[in-house]
Amino acid sequence: MYSAQGDYKNAAILILIGMMLDSMDGRIARMLRVESELGKELDSLADIVTFGVAPAMMAYYAYFSFFGAVGMAVAGLFPLFGAYRLARFNINAVKSSLQFFTGVPITAAGGLLTLLTLFHGKMQGFIFVIAFFLLCYLMVSTIKIPSLKDIPLPKYGIIITLFLGYAIYIVFKKEQHRFPYFIYVAIPLYVAFIGYQLIKTKRKNNPK
């Protein structure tokens, strides 16, 4: 609804809060021993709406609404690709046993699309379109991305809370010009973590 009203700031804040909650729900369910197939399905449905439909609506109203039905079709690709990725995830393995994700999680893709949409009016349309399709592809790709599940809950919660909390602060204060610095720090740290996990896994599988 915020996206339809052109209020991308509040729309983005709600999606970022959704990312924060999504980072905790599965771990809390396992801690309380209340995991169930019903919960897994509800989690996937919530992910499709929060990180698929909602960011796609932001993208539509910010960039694609000028193209009518074609714009609707293009924006609709994002939740479709996200739904495929979630379905593949659910049938291939149990979350708690995964060390790697196959393809970029819809949570990360939806969050990035949300942040990019905030540059509406400052970013060239073709750059946004390229990023949009790239995120769609990355979700259904077979790229192996290390999971963060091995990080103890307190440490993981602190990392996610600080990361997303700062993003929410930037959006709330309408200081989107800080995002480049935010991304320049966050992406190298995450890439370094992925590299560390890949080296650790390789050594574990091929001990000398």
Image (cartoon, helix red, strand yellow):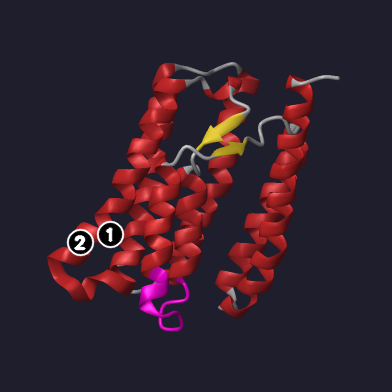
Do tag 1 and tag 2 residues touch (Cβ < 8 Å)? yes
Residue 1 in sight: no
Q: Residue 132 location, x and y as percent?
A: 39, 61
Residue corresponding to mark 1:
75
| 85 vs 96, nearest the viewer | 85
Q: Give the range drawn in magenta.
A: 118-128
Residue visible at 40% across and 49% down in the picture: 137
Q: Residue 114 location, x and y as percent?
A: 46, 62
Position of 180 compared to 109: left or right? right
Residue visible at 44% across and 41% down in the picture: 141
| 15 vs 104, nearest the viewer | 104
Per the picture, the main secondary structure of the magenta-coloured stretch is loop
Residue visible at 50% across and 44% down in the picture: 104
Tell me the element at label 1.
Answer: helix
Q: What residue type is labelled 1?
A: Ala
Residue corresponding to mark 2:
72
The tag on residue 94 is none
Position of 104 compared to 186: left or right? left
Cα distance between the residues tagged 1 and 2: 5 Å
Q: Height in image: 132 above or below 204?
A: below
Q: Which amino acid does label 2 sit on?
A: Met
Residue 190 in sight: yes
Q: Height in image: 53 above or below 89?
A: below
Q: Residue 144 location, x and y as percent?
A: 56, 37
